[in-house]
Image: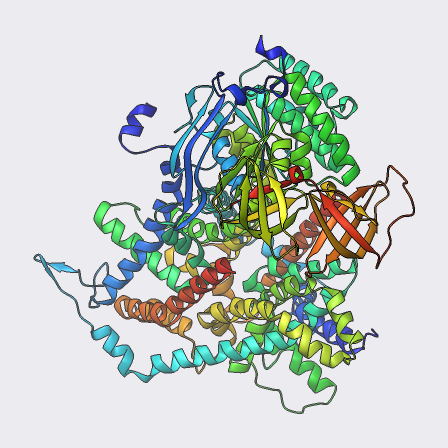
């Protein structure tokens, strides 16, 4: 079948559409002038400003910490949920658990954020915990919605797996916990890693939920970025964006090379 | 010691003096209204190679999984070596299973796959590895110890699965369609090896299969299953030569079936009036039948003699050859009788007696009264 | 120890089930009950800024917040506007995303993996920053206007920023990977021999596409559309950064109700209304899909 020129052209325009904003971010991070319409020459001064900005650096650090903890917690909880839903056969409350695990995927962030904040406020009034809002509440919130993503990723891997392999291990005398650690875990490891990375990214990128459940002294990076860009273009943010794009590009390229090696 | 004679030789099911090793008593497994296994009772003796034979959906795999402990019976008991298996989880049972998909652990080497079960018993690593080595020699995979499953061929994977399930010396080995994935030649070779291994180790095997040739080759006894029930148990010759029902007669091998009514009974010989054959048929039987009772006569294709000249025999019919299939060692003839019924006749090509019978020839088909089997259900 | 736990009805299995179950009950389900409770409260100048549910042992609740939603046209308009915007954005994303997904699915390795990588890469970079990028492009003194004016297509700058159009662009842009990936997953499984059979039977390429490819890719179309449409309705960041004061989207309304007006009860009522009108039908739809999937 002769391929028309239509598809490649449309696809090319589509990719262009996808990348022009990113490219523009990168280019203008090197623009000496603050204005987009004026090219002031190449300069790395915005990078300097960025790296000396305590507010941004502090927020970045907080976001990284929150991301790490949330991603790890979410991976553990999400994997357990996925195991329960796929391997535990008939159980009471299956519908409820399924619903609760998948609902965060469709829930608008404003609702999740609001509901969690109201929960924390009520809990503080009733029990005194959590005392005020900050990193802890953000971690709890992020873990809750990230575990949904982990559960989906791990569940699809579990379903694809031949569960006769786990039965074989049991048949050979391994108790259920052993089967999980000896057999299941190694086989779902790639899904766990993707789940962790996905959670980490989602946590790092979250603005809405963090805004609702955060407190004084716990401003995340997105919160700081948002307050800055509401006022307009800010080139040090461009510099930050460029750094992130470069990091992600390197990370993805590395993982791509590893995947190709494995396939060979 | 009874161990020295194989189950095939001892045939304990005839006298029923020996205590059965596996007792399946009134086992039922229902999923809602549907009974996958329907009130099955079965005794299996030590050292048997017992085959559960049936088509898909007959319940044989479900029964196997209940023996392994992966399904819980809705009602009934299972006893292995005198021990009731109720409440005993799969990992604690004295059974091991060889899975249809082999279920080898992909991230472990062949050695570690086989050693896994031994390590779970608490056996020391050196001793476990020694036993693994013995087992690898038995299945002729000694050079493959360090390989991973994906580096093996299908036949090799199957041997690893077998070795892994045997190395723990289980009281009962359960095999789920063990030869299904192999090509025909490999299957034939492996069938005999399987029997040899089983006889030398003395382990009781229960094999689930839908391949009746496989069941006939491997088994000490066969249990034919249909719709959740066991319809006949017996040694392969018995199942083949003396089926209890139309289903069994039809399921195993090929069969020519005549439907008719009992006309006269003289001693053990019946005269049957049938419209299928056009003439009255004569058949020997030990069954008690009434006059005018509806019966079927099953005649195996190899018991029918095909000839150009009219022979002297208990049953003779005339027909025309519709199809000839030459298979090398034998030929299969499809012959249409005057009544319209088509009979299948096989003839060995061992004797090249005269010119071969061809299409559209008029022939006589004949068989003795003893060649037919009377079936009432 | 194990015996004791067994007596209490707790075994390993129950404990394992309990862990995610309890977490989700506490941090996912109960919050909605709290929102429900506050939605029937009255706003107060206090900490917390709403009236308690139980006063002297009696329940004090009011539906005035819901009545307020119903009466003020703003909220109904915002709902309808959100649905409208999300719908058209989804259609646009489909029109752009389908050819891209098709092209990638039909490409041979290693080009295909590379293209997939290029689709996925933006997804891993910050969503917020990618939306921000459009500010620089779309604003009056932005890159787009600069280029268009320089090459003479327009003489006056286009006002795109802070209009609904900017929101459409923003939504399509950020959600495009979510449309492409399920479409790709579906199209890549399409059996080439079906298309060949269609051609062999005399169909033109366009006909093959309409009668064979399109219907078979329907599950992918639905999946991708749901992944765009549903979250887009409740979007906040895109209308906040790219939209104007006239841009009515319900996510933005909830936010300003909470942060600007400090009216927690009304914000809660908006949230409950969103749940009832949006999320519950969606969950029912997914449950129905799940049942159908299990039955087939």
Q: Residue at x 28, y 80 (%)?
A: C70
As rendered, which of C187 and A247 lies closer to the eye?
Answer: C187
Answer with left or right where residue A133 lies relative to residue B224: left
User: Residue A237 occupies which quadrant of the picture?
Assistant: bottom right
Q: Check the image and report above or below for B29 versus A18.
A: above
Name the image quarter holding the N terminus of chain C: top left
Q: Residue at x 61, y 80 (%)?
A: C141
As rendered, which of A62 and B76 lies closer to the eye?
Answer: B76
Q: Check the image and report above or below for B306 versus A109.
A: above
Seen as rendered, the residue at the extreme bottom is C155
Q: Residue at x 87, y 54 (%)?
A: B358
x then y, percent, for residue B299: 66, 44
Seen as rendered, the residue at the extreme top is B1
x then y, percent, for residue A91: 38, 45
x then y, percent, for residue B136: 72, 21
x then y, percent, for residue C17: 39, 41
Answer with left or right where residue C227 lies relative to residue A25: left
As rendered, which of B71 and A142 lies closer to the eye?
Answer: B71
């Amino acid at each position: 079948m002769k391929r028309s020129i239509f598809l490649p052209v449309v696809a090319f325009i589509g990719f262009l559409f996808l990348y022009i904003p990113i490219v523009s971010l990168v280019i203008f991070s090197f623009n000496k002038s603050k204005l987009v319409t004026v090219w002031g020459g190449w300069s790395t001064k915005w990078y300097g400003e960025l790296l000396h900005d305590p507010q941004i650096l502090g927020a970045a650090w907080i976001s990284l910490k929150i991301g790490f903890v949330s991603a790890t917690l979410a991976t553990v909880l999400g994997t357990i949920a996925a195991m329960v839903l796929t391997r535990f056969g008939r159980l009471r409350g299956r519908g409820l658990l399924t619903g609760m695990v998948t609902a965060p995927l469709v829930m608008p962030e404003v609702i999740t954020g609001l509901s969690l904040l109201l929960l924390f406020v009520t809990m503080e009034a009733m029990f005194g915990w959590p005392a005020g809002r900050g990193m802890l509440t953000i971690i709890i919130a992020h873990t809750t919605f990230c575990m949904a993503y982990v559960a989906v990723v791990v569940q699809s891997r579990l379903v694809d797996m031949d569960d006769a392999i786990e039965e074989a291990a049991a048949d050979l005398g391994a108790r259920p916990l052993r089967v999980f650690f000896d057999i299941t875990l190694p086989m779902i490891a790639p899904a766990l890693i993707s789940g962790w990375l996905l959670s980490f990214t989602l946590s790092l990128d979250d603005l809405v939920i963090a805004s609702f459940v955060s407190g004084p002294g716990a401003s995340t990076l997105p919160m700081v970025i948002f307050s800055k860009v509401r006022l307009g273009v800010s080139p040090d943010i461009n510099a930050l964006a460029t750094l992130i794009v470069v990091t992600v590009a390197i990370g993805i390229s590395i993982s791509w090379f590893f995947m190709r090696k494995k396939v060979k | 010691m009874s161990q020295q004679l194989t189950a095939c030789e001892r045939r304990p099911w005839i006298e029923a003096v020996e205590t059965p090793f596996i007792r399946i008593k009134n086992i039922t497994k229902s999923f809602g209204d549907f009974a996958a296994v329907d009130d099955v009772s079965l005794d299996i003796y030590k050292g048997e190679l017992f085959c559960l034979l049936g088509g898909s959906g007959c319940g044989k795999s479900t029964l196997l999984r209940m023996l392994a402990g992966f399904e819980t019976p809705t009602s009934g008991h299972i006893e292995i070596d005198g021990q009731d298996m109720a409440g005993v989880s799969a990992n604690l049972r004295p059974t091991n299973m060889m899975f249809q998909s082999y279920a080898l652990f992909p991230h472990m080497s062949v050695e570690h796959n086989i050693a896994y079960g031994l390590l779970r018993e608490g056996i020391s690593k050196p001793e476990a590895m020694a036993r693994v080595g013995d087992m690898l020699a038995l299945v002729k995979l000694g050079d493959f110890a360090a390989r991973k499953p994906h580096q093996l061929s299908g036949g090799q994977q199957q041997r690893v699965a077998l070795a892994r399930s045997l190395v723990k010396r289980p009281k009962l080995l359960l095999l789920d369609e063990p030869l299904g994935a192999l090509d025909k030649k490999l299957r034939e070779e492996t069938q005999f090896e399987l029997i040899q291994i089983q006889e030398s180790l003395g382990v009781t095997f229960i094999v689930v299969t839908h391949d009746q040739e496989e069941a006939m080759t491997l088994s000490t006894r066969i249990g034919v299953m249909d719709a959740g029930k066991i319809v006949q148990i017996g040694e392969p010759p018995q199942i083949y030569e003396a089926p209890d029902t139309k289903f069994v007669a039809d399921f195993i091998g090929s069969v020519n079936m005549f439907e008719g009514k009992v006309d006269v009974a003289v001693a053990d010989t019946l005269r049957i009036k049938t419209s299928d054959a056009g003439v009255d048929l004569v058949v020997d039987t030990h069954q008690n039948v009434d006059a005018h009772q509806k019966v079927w006569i099953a005649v195996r294709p190899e018991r029918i003699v095909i000839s150009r000249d009219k022979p002297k025999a208990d049953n003779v019919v005339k027909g025309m050859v519709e199809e000839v299939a030459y298979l090398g060692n034998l030929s299969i003839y499809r012959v249409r009788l005057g009544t319209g019924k088509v009979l299948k006749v096989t003839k060995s090509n061992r004797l090249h007696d005269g010119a071969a019978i061809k299409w559209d020839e008029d022939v006589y088909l004949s068989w003795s009264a003893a060649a037919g089997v009377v079936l009432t259900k | 120890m194990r015996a004791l736990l067994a007596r209490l009805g707790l075994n390993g299995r129950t404990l394992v089930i309990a862990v995610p179950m309890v977490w989700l009950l506490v941090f996912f389900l109960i919050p909605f009950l709290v929102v429900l409770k506050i939605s029937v409260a009255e706003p107060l100048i206090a900490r917390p800024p709403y009236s308690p549910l139980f006063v002297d042992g009696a329940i004090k609740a009011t539906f005035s917040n819901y009545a307020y939603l119903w009466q003020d046209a703003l909220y109904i308009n915002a709902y309808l506007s959100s649905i409208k915007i999300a719908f058209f954005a989804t259609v646009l994303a489909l029109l752009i995303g389908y050819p891209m997904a098709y092209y990638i699915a039909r490409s041979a390795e290693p080009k295909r993996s590379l293209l997939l990588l290029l689709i996925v890469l933006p997804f891993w970079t910050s969503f917020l920053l990618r939306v921000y990028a459009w500010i620089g492009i779309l604003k009056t003194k932005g890159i787009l206007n600069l280029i268009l004016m320089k090459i003479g297509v327009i003489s006056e700058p286009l006002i795109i920023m802070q209009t609904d159009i900017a929101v459409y662009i923003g939504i399509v842009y950020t959600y495009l990977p979510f449309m492409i990936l399920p479409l790709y997953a579906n199209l890549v499984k399409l059996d080439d021999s079906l298309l060949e059979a269609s051609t062999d039977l005399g169909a033109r390429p366009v006909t093959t596409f309409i009668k064979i490819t399109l219907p078979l890719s329907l599950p992918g179309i639905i999946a991708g559309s749901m992944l765009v449409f549903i979250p887009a309705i409740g979007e906040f960041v895109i209308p906040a950064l790219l939209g104007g004061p006239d841009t009515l989207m319900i996510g933005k309304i909830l936010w300003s109700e909470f942060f600007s007006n400090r009216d927690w009860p009304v914000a809660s009522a908006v949230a409950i209304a969103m749940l009832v009108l949006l999320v519950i039908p969606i969950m029912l739809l997914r449950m129905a899909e799940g049942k159908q999937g299990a039955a087939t």
